[in-house]
Amino acid sequence: MPTVAADRLAGKTALVTGAAGAIGTVVVQRLSAAGVNILACGRNKSRLEHLANQTGAVPFVADLTDVEACRSAVADAERRFGRLDLVHLGVSTRGDCRDIAELDLADYRRVVAANVDSVVFSLEAAVPALRRAGGGAITVSSSLAGVTGYGQFPLYSMTKAAVNGLVRATSRRLARSDIYLAALCPSFVDKHLLGDLRSHLVQKKIPLLAPGEVADALVQRLCATPGDEPIWILQPGHPPVPCRYPDVSPLTGGSSGAVPR
Ligand SMILES: NC(=O)c1ccc[n+]([C@@H]2O[C@H](COP(=O)([O-])OP(=O)(O)OC[C@H]3O[C@@H](n4cnc5c(N)ncnc54)[C@H](OP(=O)(O)O)[C@@H]3O)[C@@H](O)[C@H]2O)c1
């Protein structure tokens, strides 16, 4: 973990969604090691309790595709810790759809609910709390699939592109309230849940990121200054880089080299 995190984050309070997931778990471990009070949110009670025993995080069990559950999580964090400074949003599912001509409506709703609704509802609930705290930082787990598209998972790619659009469009306004909002777009991460995809990637010699590398980049973003770049790409063997469209004029005006946010 970058040492800057321990210096800047000690004593702060964080809400982490998708906390029992492969990357969310390491984010909670890193934040806990940096002295952060954490509300660790997810659906899986036993995995959250295990994480709580390891790290001292407080478990919050809920389906975070529900707007009221997101509001309750934020209210619980403020009630327990007195304020909310940091948020990491990691709820996600890749879904089963590989061919748009064979769309399963229930699968589509599940992917949009986990990857988009949960982010929108969590932001709606958390931003007022961060404003009450006088500022803070929010990171969203997006994906390189949302930048380049990934043909194996078109719905997943669509939802991550939606998240990137929301973050780009929202980050500038939030910076005025001293809130930094960023999305991190990693390529493939090595974890057992990659399942059959993992052997395919290994066979094709496609390098994989470790969950710890992704968590470190996320924690680094939680230490960034409001107004910093909103969308970051993370690939194996490279430090995180901002995702820019240098030849596109931003809708907000300004020079064509600027990031459209
Ligand atoms: N793994 C990769 O290759 C990769 C690459 C790029 C980006 N990312 C992004 O990184 C983030 C974390 O990925 P990961 O690999 O750590 O995934 P993961 O292990 O599947 O974790 C996702 C978490 O989201 C939770 N979740 C899903 N639906 C939920 C709901 N309705 N309510 C509450 N929690 C819910 C899951 O809880 P349950 O345990 O209850 O299902 C799980 O703990 C995701 O946003 C993903 O898109 C991953």
Image: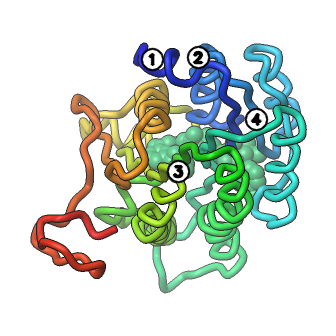
Going by the image, does 38 lie left or right of 234?
A: right
Contact, mark 4 vs mark 2 (Cβ under 8 Å): no
Decide which of tag 3 and tag 4 comes sooner along the chain: 4
Q: Name the residue under label 1.
A: 1
Mark 1 and mark 2: Cα distance apart in space = 9 Å
- Quadrant for the C terminus in the image: bottom left
Contact, mark 1 vs mark 2 (Cβ under 8 Å): yes
Decide which of tag 2 and tag 3 comes sooner along the chain: 2
- Circle 3: element type: strand
Q: Mark 2 points at which residue?
A: 34
Q: Mark 3 points at which residue?
A: 179
Q: Residue sitting at 85 percent across and 26 percent down?
A: 49
Which is more foreground, mark 4 or mark 2? 2
Q: Mark 4 points at which residue?
A: 40
Mark 4 and mark 2: Cα distance apart in space = 15 Å
Mark 3 and mark 4: Cα distance apart in space = 21 Å
Mark 4 and mark 1: Cα distance apart in space = 19 Å
